[in-house]
Image (spheres, helix red, strand yellow):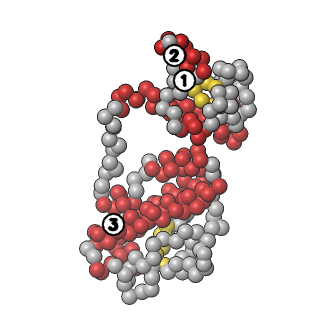
Amino acid sequence: MATNSSSHSPRTVEEIFKDFSARHAAVLRALTTDVEDFYSQCDPERDNLCLYGHPNESWEVAVPAEEVPPELPEPVLGINFARDGMERRDWLSLVAMHTDSWLLSVAFYFGARLNRNERSRVFTLINDLPTVFEAVTGRKPLKDKPSVDSGKKSKNNAKREKQIKANQRLQEESDDEDEGNEDEHEETLCGSCGTNGNEDEFWIGCDICEKWYHGKCVKITPAKAQSIKEYRCPSCSNKRAKHMA
């Protein structure tokens, strides 16, 4: 029986990614370096079997946990039944795809209490690794295709990324032990009220004058900011209106 226990329970972004990397390395070894051993253990005559990767980078082919619901998300059940009914390469690819799904489910199970920015960081770290499917099949990750008008939007996108990163830094500042970053944030003053404000406040940057404002000072919420392609502060908006008049 598998030892898929939550007694090992990572909490932070770094801990969750470390756990993911270890499990990822374990199952990848099972499907590549140790593939002959893995293949022989997946006997179709045995009960429903699952492929587990553990935080100590070991892998295991075993029946699922008996408790319902299980302590952790379970891998796909019955990988052994299809072994002899498919081409070996296709069967390994199928197991790899299901394994990628399981690895993500475990990571985001541990990350249930993370905030939005922390979940995004976890996914970014995970996404920088090749998937098990890509490694097993030898496929290279496809590069994102630029849109037709990407050149026109590149400047605004860069500013938007800068704004998002700044907001992430402000939200995580309470947990950040780097005093240098804290000093940097203290130097940023709101273009409306002239103060630095609370460390957890939402900020938005003007894409025209590049000044920063507290969201509450310019009546912009984080949700509203997501739908704004180019933000103009009140001062820049007034200047544009006078010019057009």
Q: Are marks 1 and 2 in contact (CB under 8 Å)?
A: yes
Vertical relation: 124 (above or below) 50: above
- Mark 1, residues whose alpha carbon is within 10 Å: few (<14), some, or many (≥20)? some
Amino acid at pointer 2: Arg
Marks 1 and 3 sit apart, C-alpha to C-alpha, by 50 Å
Which percent across, then down, holds residue 221?
63, 36
Q: Residue at x 63, y 49 (%)?
A: 115
**Mark 1 vs mark 2: which is more N-terminal?**
1
**Mark 1 vs mark 3: which is more N-terminal?**
3
The tag on residue 93 is: 3
Marks 1 and 2 sit apart, C-alpha to C-alpha, by 9 Å
Q: Are marks 1 and 3 in contact (CB under 8 Å)?
A: no
Asked where in the image residue 187 lies, by quadrant, the reply is top right
Which percent across, then down, holds residue 237?
55, 19
Frontmost residue, 66 versus 214: 214
Marks 2 and 3 sit apart, C-alpha to C-alpha, by 57 Å
Q: Residue at x 52, y 24 (%)?
A: 207
Which percent across, then down, holds residue 153?
40, 29
For this view, does 72 lie left or right of residue 100?
right
Is the N terminus in the top left, top right, bottom left or bottom right quadrant? bottom right
Instruction: Give the number of the mark in front: 1 or 3.
Output: 1
Asked where in the image residue 77 lies, by quadrant, the reply is bottom left
Frontmost residue, 107 versus 31: 107
- Mark 3, residues whose alpha carbon is within 10 Å: few (<14), some, or many (≥20)? some
Q: Which residue is mark 2?
A: 240
Amino acid at pointer 3: Ser
Residue furthest front as drawn: 245
| SS under mark 2 | helix
